[in-house]
Image (cartoon, helix red, strand yellow):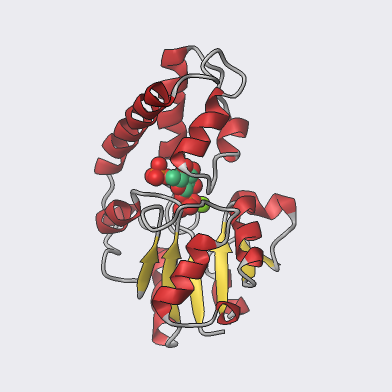
């Protein structure tokens, strides 16, 4: 094992609560039902695919692409307003300490996120220059469970896929890791599906596995 690829939202930082608030605001304006359970299905899924899930049982499910683009932009604007408030203090000390210990061990580290806001988030929490590579929603055409985001991360790190371990909170991300022939550590919501090679309850447990 030479490298670790970290999902961002729900693993490094809890921006998942801001995704929920932003989707909820859009859904309420449209009069569409939305709850935490639906929100969990959006983990690791791209913005436009997420919108399709949010609208799936509503009168807007067959809205044209122009309308859908406007709705996605509205959600993203709310989300980015919430992100604006973030500072390095939002990064948990346990996460920073674990990442620093892994770096001291010479392990290569990349982000593997479906988000197009990944670099903004990393800058806000003081990790803009920390990772050896960033693979995110801007460099992929297929989102998780497609393995593209993790294969690109391995490529950017110049390591073989089989030398990488992925840390994920989305079951779609665990599938993506396995399709990339990488091992996967499940945390948060992903644990309940039982598909990870390891399950962790706390971020520092990554050190025990590595
Ligand atoms: P954006 P991850 C994913 O991030 C989120 O889990 C998912 O809920 C979101 O829809 C997706 O990014 C796209 O995000 O709208 O910011 O481009 O978990 O892959 O780091
Ligand atoms: Mg995630």
Answer with left or right where residue 63 lies relative to residue 33. left
Q: Is residue 139 visible?
A: yes
In front of the other: 23 or 88: 23
Residue, x 71% and y 50% (percent of image)?
Answer: 192
Residue, x 59% and y 24% (percent of image)?
Answer: 56
In front of the other: 203 or 75: 75
* x and y percentages locating residue 52 in the rendered image: 53, 30
Quarter of the picture holding the C terminus:
bottom right
Residue, x 32% and y 31% (percent of image)?
Answer: 78
When asked about the image quadrant of residue 101, the answer is: bottom left
Residue, x 28% and y 47% (percent of image)?
Answer: 86
The answer to whether residue 162 is above or below residue 50 is below
Most extreme residue toward the right, as rendered? 194
In front of the other: 32 or 56: 56
The answer to whether residue 7 is above or below residue 72 is below
When asked about the image quadrant of residue 67, the answer is: top left
* x and y percentages locating residue 32 in the rendered image: 52, 16
* x and y percentages locating residue 66 in the rendered image: 37, 24
Question: Number of labelled discs?
Answer: 0
The answer to whether residue 179 is above or below residue 90 is below
* x and y percentages locating residue 209 in the rendered image: 62, 77
Q: Is residue 9 visible?
A: no
When asked about the image quadrant of residue 47, the answer is: top left
Quarter of the picture holding the N terminus:
bottom right
The answer to whether residue 49 is above or below residue 92 is above
């Amino acid at each position: 094992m030479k490298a670790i690829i970290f999902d961002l939202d729900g693993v490094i930082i809890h921006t998942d609560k801001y995704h929920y608030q932003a989707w909820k605001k859009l859904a309420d304006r449209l009069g569409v039902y939305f709850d935490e359970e639906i929100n969990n299905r959006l983990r690791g899924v791209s913005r436009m695919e997420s919108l399709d899930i949010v609208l799936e049982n509503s009168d807007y499910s067959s809205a044209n692409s122009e309308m859908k683009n406007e709705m996605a932009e509205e959600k993203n604007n709310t989300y980015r307003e919430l992100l604006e408030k973030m500072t390095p203090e939002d990064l948990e000390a346990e996460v920073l300490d674990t990442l620093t210990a892994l770096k001291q061990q010479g392990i290569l580290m990349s982000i593997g996120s479906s988000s197009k806001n990944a670099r903004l988030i990393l800058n806000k929490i003081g990790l803009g220059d920390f990772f050896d590579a960033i693979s995110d929603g801007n460099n992929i055409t297929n989102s998780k469970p497609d393995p593209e985001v993790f294969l690109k991360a391995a490529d950017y790190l110049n390591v073989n896929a089989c030398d990488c371990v992925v840390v994920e909170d989305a079951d779609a991300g665990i599938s993506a890791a396995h399709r990339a022939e990488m091992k996967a550590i499940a945390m948060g919501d992903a644990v309940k599906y039982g598909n990870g090679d390891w399950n962790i309850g706390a971020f520092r447990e990554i050190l025990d596995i590595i």
